[in-house]
Amino acid sequence: MKTLDLDAVKAFVLIAELQSFTRAAEALDSTQSAISLKLRRLEDRLGRRLLERTPRQVRLSAEGTAFLDAARELVGAHERAVASFDIEQRRMVIGISHQIVGGELPALLRRMSEHDPHLLIELRVAGSREVMQAYEEGSLDAALVLQAEENRRNGEALFAETFGWIAAADWLHRSGQPLPLATQGESCSIRMAAVRALDQAGIPWTEVFIGKGAAVVGSAAAAGLAVAVIARRTAPAGTIDISEALSLPALPTHEVVLYSALHDPRSRHALRTLAVAFKSLSLA
């Protein structure tokens, strides 16, 4: 029976999810050369080529795709086994901007739970300003917010979030009618930028739906009610970006930034898991 190096299996899972040796090395606090060596030894041990590498892309081979689910289960089982002796429940209060939370939330929570089964997660979803205020007041252990690059302070920028004009695939704009918008309300910086860009371009608009959270606003677009101003990453199934089709103005790019003052290893590992999960979603 072949035995596998768990660290190598974990490296493979991260490379597959992040589509990058560099990001996987960052997540494991390692180097790209060390990660590459682990992956090569794992492939030699299995006698299978798991990844196809090109200068610009890393993707799963057919054999890597077949192995990925089992590899995830193996890593998860190992994490749960290690945590079984750590019976102390750790509570972590995390604030997340509703602008960046879409339908991927269940996957994020599952990954956090698999990492540390005894971690009690209290998740607070609000606007980026409210989340940062709560973090600065000390009521949050960590904050994951959306910020313009010039406003970022000592947080860790995870990735750049791009926004679009999202509508149902079969939605048709009625000639002569104002563009119906679904937004997250007047306090939303993306909404402010969107309507300012429309006004400057001379495109009439009307707000027909207001909701809190990309998932809620995206649902209005999927239902054909309006054009949602949300991150392209959070666009629900059955919707498309109509920016080019209607010659709509470009929307600003913001950074997804993680703030935390936690230093104990267990908390840092949990936050690293969260950061890696969001990075992987940005590449999906």
Image: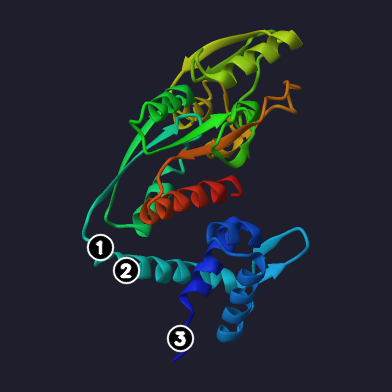
**Residue at the location (52% across, 20% down)?**
225
Say which amino acid is labelled 2.
Val
Say which amino acid is labelled 3.
Thr
Q: Secondary structure at mark 3?
A: loop
Above or below, 51 relative to 267:
below
Q: Earlier in the sequence, mark 1 or mark 3?
A: 3
Disc 2 to disc 1, how far (Cα)? 8 Å
Q: Which residue is mark 3?
A: 3
Say which amino acid is labelled 1.
Asp
**Residue at the location (45% across, 24% down)?**
127
Q: Secondary structure at mark 2?
A: helix
Q: Nearer the viewer, residue 113 or 105?
A: 113
Disc 2 to disc 3, how far (Cα)? 18 Å
Disc 1 to disc 3, how far (Cα)? 26 Å
Residue 208 position in % (x across, y down): 51, 13
The answer to whether the residue labelled 2 contacts the one labelled 1, judged by CB atoms less than 8 Å apart, is yes
Q: Earlier in the sequence, mark 2 or mark 3?
A: 3
The answer to whether the residue labelled 2 contacts the one labelled 3, judged by CB atoms less than 8 Å apart, is no
Q: Which residue is mark 1?
A: 86
Residue 117 position in % (x across, y down): 29, 57
Above or below, 243 relative to 15:
above
